[in-house]
Image: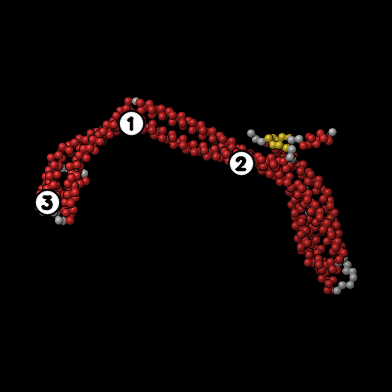
Amino acid sequence: MGKQESFSEKTATSEVGFEELPAWLEKSSQKISSDIEKDASGLFKELEAAISELKESNTRLQEAKVEGNFDIRAVKRAKSNRENVTKQVGVFIDKFGVLESRDFRALKEYQETAVQNLDTCLEHMSQSFRYTKAVFPQESKDVTESLGRLGQVLNKLKGTIQGHKKEMEALEAVSTEMKEIKRLSASIKAENLEFEAKNRKIQALRNEIAETDQALEGFKKGEAWQKLQSLQEELDIARDRLKKAETGLNSLILPFSGNLSKIKKLHESGRYTLKPDVKQQLDICLETPANLAPSFFPELQKVFEDPALDIQTQKKEKALSQVKAAISGFEEKKKEYIEAQKALEAKKAELAGSDTGKLAELEHKETELLARTRLLEEELESSEKKLTVFKEELKNKEAELQASVAVIDSSVKIQLLP
């Protein structure tokens, strides 16, 4: 019954708070290190015995006498190669050293270095050993067996290390993952504060936009806005009036404008000569008839009546009647145009002098507020994306932490940060 209760207590899930993890980690590290040292202590006794045995075997090989009948050259070769074998074994023994600390990292490094040195020793003595064992077979065999036993103990030590490797890697992983979780939690907290601050700013801007909209609406209901609208309508009417007057003026010139263009070409080609002031007025007539002087038409009538003008008689007669019609209607049409132009300029001046500053100010303010809001909304969207990434990374790290802890102790569940 007592054993069952003990087993139940051992396998029951225990919760460890995130802030308690460093202490738990230290305790777990000490326990694993203690287990490793306990497992390794017996092997180190075996290791000491194996090294001692190797020293003795190496000494026996070094001091061995030649027994039996061998070719003098074989003996000489065996003795010189024996020196290399015993030297390499001696170097290997000297490199073995004493392990000061038996923590996992030191133990792992010690075992790996010892195996590497053993391999180097075997490699450097292999060729010499072939000649040595021919003359000193038993002593050579003893050295070989001693090296083999030492290698077996090192392999056992490797097995012990491998048995605790996952736990030790998990200890390191827990430490790294804790730092990452803290960093991500701090990033999420900072980003949340930034997110909330931007949200508040956006809300404040929206309130200000609403107030500006109300001010604009109020302004548009006021007398200044009504007057402005009325002036705008009057300006449009004045613009239409000017356009009609200009059309009326142009309608007098349009019927014979083709003939005017022909006269201009004749003048420019030298086939007909116009007086300078008539040429100047003709250009004005073709480009901006509204600026034309009434005195131009009598002069133009003389041009069309001139026999030297190379235009068909029928076209000349038709043009003359059109010019006469223009003479009779031009002054009245121009007067209408000038009056319409003056009326338009007056309305423009009146509109420019009206109080539109408040409207422009409110519209500018609204545009600026909307631009700032859009910019903050883009930043808010970016913050939201960053938060999503941070939270996903945190979730993954928390899962990795729990998995690493489970490797050390499967009964422990971490209470993660809120």
Q: Are marks 1 and 3 in contact (CB under 8 Å)?
A: no
| SS for dot 3 | helix
Could you say which is closer to the camera, residue 134 or residue 220? 220
Residue 275 in sight here? no
Frontmost of labels 1 and 3 is: 3
Give the percent coordinates (x, y) of residue 129.
81, 66
Q: Amino acid at mark 1?
A: Thr
For label 2, the SS is helix
Mark 1 Cα-neighbour bin, 10 Å: few <14, some 14–19, many ≥20 = few
Residue drawn at point x = 88 percent, y = 67 percent: 65
Residue at image location 68% in from the left, 35% down from the top: 415
Residue identified by numbered label 3: 313
Q: Position of residue 134 (x, y in %)?
A: 84, 68
Q: Considering depth in this image, is 24 or 252 the residue closer to the camera?
A: 252
Name the residue that disc number 1 marks. Answer: 356
Q: Earlier in the sequence, mark 1 or mark 3?
A: 3
Q: Position of residue 173 (x, y in %)?
A: 68, 44
Front tag of 2 and 3: 3
Please give the label number shown on residue 393.
2
Q: Quadrant of the N terminus?
A: top right
CA–CA distance between discs 1 and 2? 56 Å
Which residue: 79% across, 46% down? 37
Q: Residue at x 81, y 55 (%)?
A: 152
Amino acid of disc 3: Thr
Figure quadrant of residue 94: bottom right
Give me the C-alpha separation between circle 1 and circle 3: 61 Å
The quadrant where residue 132 appears: bottom right
First along the sequence among labels 1 and 2: 1
